[in-house]
Amino acid sequence: LAKTTQPISMDSYEGQEVNITCSHNNIATNDYITWYQQFPSQGPRFIIQGYKTKVTNEVASLFIPADRKSSTLSLPRVSLSDTAVYYCLVGDIAGGYQKVTFGTGTKLQVIP
Amino acid sequence: GAVVSQHPSRVICKSGTSVKIECRSLDFQATTMFWYRQFPKQSLMLMATSNEGSKATYEQGVEKDKFLINHASLTLSTLTVTSAHPEDSSFYICSARGGNQETQYFGPGTRLLVL
């Protein structure tokens, strides 16, 4: 299982773009990268998923370099409601799902 | 789409009793469901993986006789905490993945407090 490393915490002012980077040096060929958001006392919420290059949806962008040993979640113009813990997960999801292990996550604090 | 529900959302029980938590995939068939436990200010810890119609696979250190998992249908998995003790108090979260879905979707969690 690919282990992930993220910063423990980050602070950002409202309206700024936030980039959270995750390292996954031993990512396997079949592994995808998935990011989740978790608020206190709630289950994690899917944000975005990708395999390589760049993926964008209505809430975030995911940048994955060619070697796939890291990935960056980009949140545009954060608001106070984006204060949460963000988890980067790496796992084989094709052809028979393999379990993934949650890392420590990054606690993002958005400041007014 | 991809909604997962859990019931109950919160439960308080006496030590020694058993508690059942249900996890349902509401708009897709979940071939695989996962059960996690999360203690305060900690990350999620995978307890077990269950596939519909087969026995669950438990993570190292998780007692299968204490945490009974049943995945009897493609939309329902249950976790029963047997003879619960105060140290079992935690936030239990399930997730589900369907056959064609490339990710897992999480339920809202169940807060268990054992007195």
Image (cartoon, coloured by chain):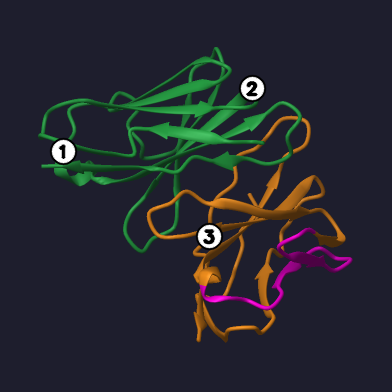
Chain colours: A orange, B green
Kind of residue at badge 1: His
Of labels 1 and 2, the one closer to you: 2
| Circle 1/circle 2 CB separation < 8 Å | no
**Which stretch appears magenta?**
A57-80
At mark 3, the secondary structure is loop
Report the Cα–Cα distance between label 2 and label 3.
27 Å
Does the rendering let one see residue A107?
no
Kind of residue at badge 2: Gln
Q: Position of residue A81 (x, y in %)?
A: 52, 69
Q: Which mark is residue B85?
A: 1
Kindly identify which residue carries mark 2. B29
Residue at the image point whose x is 52% and y is 51% from the top? A44
Mark 1 neighbour density, 10 Å: few (under 14) some (14–19) many (20 or more)? some
Same-chain check, marks 3 and 1: no
Question: What chain does badge 3 belong to?
Answer: A
Q: Which mark is residue A103?
A: 3
- Whether residue A72 is in magenta: the answer is yes
Residue at the image point whose x is 81% and y is 65% from the top? A64
The quadrant holding residue B7 is top left
The quadrant holding residue B104 is top right
Q: Position of residue A75 (x, y in %)?
A: 69, 72
Kind of residue at badge 3: Gly
At mark 2, the secondary structure is loop
Residue at the image point whose x is 20% and y is 43% from the top? B113
Mark 3 neighbour density, 10 Å: few (under 14) some (14–19) many (20 or more)? many
Residue at the image point whose x is 45% and y is 52% from the top? B44
Name the foreground residue: A90 vs B31: B31
Q: Position of residue A2 (x, y in %)?
A: 65, 54
Report the Cα–Cα distance between label 3 and label 1.
27 Å
